[in-house]
Image: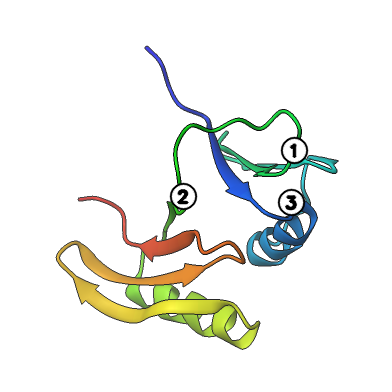
Amino acid sequence: MISPNLLILYVENPAASGRFYEQLFGRAPVAQSPGFVAFRFDNGLGLGLWSTSASDFVSGGSGNRSEIAIVVEEDAEIDALHDRWKAQGVAIEQPPFMAVFGRTFVAQDPDGHRIRVCPPDK
């Protein structure tokens, strides 16, 4: 069985995006180069930030807006994370609200990628 274990976001400035995510996640990247920054998480998932101006970057599509999700168990934890990120200056696209799947909010990284915080699927 195939299990995806790496998400890649295409970014204008990997170093700046790396600093953003380092602050957001409270952990340093595991790898850095001028065109790529990588994070690894305890659950095995990796996040790569790849420069759209790197010489080896090729894309036939257009746009690079994506959404990653961070699952948080309790509504109070969702609200607390929203408040902490907002105080840190993270752009908030949608403040906390009740969606069909539960309490959620959406932040944005420097490239406009959406970061959704939401409850687990039940």
Label 2 sits on residue:
63
Give the camera-side residue of 113 and 54. 54
Which residue shows up at 57% across the image and 39% down it? 8
Q: Amino acid at mark 2?
A: Gly
Mark 1 neighbour density, 10 Å: few (under 14) some (14–19) many (20 or more): few
Ranked by sequence position, the earlier of labels 2 and 1 is: 1
Q: CA distance from mark 1 to mark 3?
A: 10 Å
Which residue shows up at 64% across the image and 51% down it? 11
Mark 2 neighbour density, 10 Å: few (under 14) some (14–19) many (20 or more): few
Label 1 sits on residue:
54
Please tell me in which quadrant of the rendered image residue 45 appears: top right
Label 3 sits on residue:
14
> Which structural element holds mark 2?
loop
Does residue 5 lie above or below 8 as drawn? Answer: above
Give the camera-side residue of 30 and 36. 36
Q: CA distance from mark 2 to mark 3?
A: 17 Å
| Residue 27 spot, x, y in % from top left | 73, 55
> Which structural element holds mark 3?
helix
Q: Amino acid at mark 1?
A: Ala
| In the image: residue 66, left or right of residue 30 | left
Q: CA distance from mark 2 to mark 1?
A: 16 Å
> Which structural element holds mark 1?
loop
| Residue 39 spot, x, y in % from top left | 69, 43
- Circles 2 and 3: CB atoms closer than 8 Å: no
Does residue 106 lie above or below 45 as drawn? Answer: below
Which residue shows up at 70% across the image and 62% down it? 26
Mark 3 neighbour density, 10 Å: few (under 14) some (14–19) many (20 or more): many
Q: Amino acid at mark 3?
A: Pro
